[in-house]
Amino acid sequence: MAGKRKTKTSKTAALGPSKWRLQHGGFSDPIRDADPETGSPVQHRRAVDTLGMMLANGTITHQMHDAGGYFRALFRSAALDGMSKSVLVRLPGQTADTLSDHHMDARRKIGAALDALGGHESAAGSCAWHVVGLEMSVREWAMRQGWGGRPVAPPQAQGMLVATLSVLAGHFRLVPRTRAA
C-alpha cells in the first residue's frame, strides 16, 4: 500500500465535465442561472460545437454560422436526424406515424439547399448532411465518410465545410448576392 496515494479532488473538478467528455470538445465558462422549475441556483456549461469553434477562430463569418444553424434546425424539423419522438397516445387503427406539413416543408427546404450544394452525393452536400445536419465532427466525416468513398485529409475537409457554409449562406439569402462584372 506504500505505492498508492490518496489524492484530494477539489469541488470545482467534481462539478466540471469528466476527463472523457473534455477530450471530445471544449466547454464554455460556467454560467450561473436559476432552475426554471424550482428556482434554485444552478451552474451549467454549454458544449462548444464545430460551427461555434470555427466562428470563434474567425474561420467562418456570422452569416455562415447562422446558415449552418438554420440548416441544422431545418434538419431537425424535417425529422432526418434519427432522433424520433415517441407518441404517447396512440389512436386505434393507426400503425405508423405520419409526417406533418411542417415536416414536409422542412424536407423540401433541405432538398432545395442540397440541390444548391450540388446534390446529396456531392462533397458539399455530403458535408452539409453529415457535419451540419447530423452534427458529426469534421475529422470523423473526413476519415469515415469522406467523399466518393475516399477519406479526405482533415484540413481539406474543414475547407469543404467552409465552402459549404458559404454556399448555404448565399442560398438562405443571409449574404447579398454580387454580380460578376
Image (cartoon, helix red, strand yellow):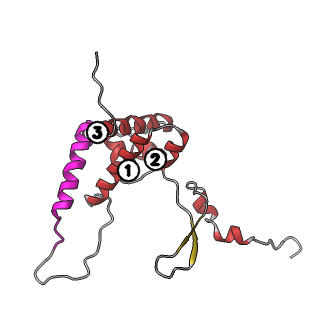
Residue lying at 32% horizontally and 49% vertically, measured from the top left: 71
Amino acid residing under circle 2: Leu
Is residue 100 highlighted in magenta? Answer: yes
Residue lying at 52% horizontally and 38% vertically, measured from the top left: 58
Provide the secondary structure element on which disc 3 rests: loop
Which residue is the site of mark 3?
173
- Binning the other alpha carbons within 10 Å of mark 1 as few (below 14), some (14 to 19) or many (20 upward) gives some
Residue 18 in percent (x, y) is at 62, 65
- State the extent of the magenta-drawn residues as a range: 96-120
Q: Distance between the residues labelled 2 and 1?
A: 8 Å
Q: Distance between the residues labelled 2 and 3?
A: 19 Å
* 2 or 1: tag closer to the N-terminus: 2
* 2 or 3: tag closer to the N-terminus: 2
Amino acid residing under circle 1: Gly
Instruction: Using the image as rendered, state which of residue 179 and residue 68 is in the foreground.
Output: 179
* Residue 51 numbered tag: 2
- Snapshot quadrant of residue 102: bottom left
Residue lying at 31% horizontally and 32% vertically, measured from the top left: 176
Provide the secondary structure element on which disc 2 rests: helix
Q: Are the residues at dot 2 and dot 1 in contact (C-beta closer than 8 Å)?
A: yes
Instruction: Using the image as rendered, state which of residue 147 and residue 92 is in the foreground.
Output: 92
Which residue is the site of mark 1?
69
Q: Are the residues at dot 2 and dot 3 in contact (C-beta closer than 8 Å)?
A: no
Is residue 130 highlighted in magenta? Answer: no
Count the numbered circles shown.
3
Amino acid residing under circle 3: Arg
- Binning the other alpha carbons within 10 Å of mark 3 as few (below 14), some (14 to 19) or many (20 upward) gives few
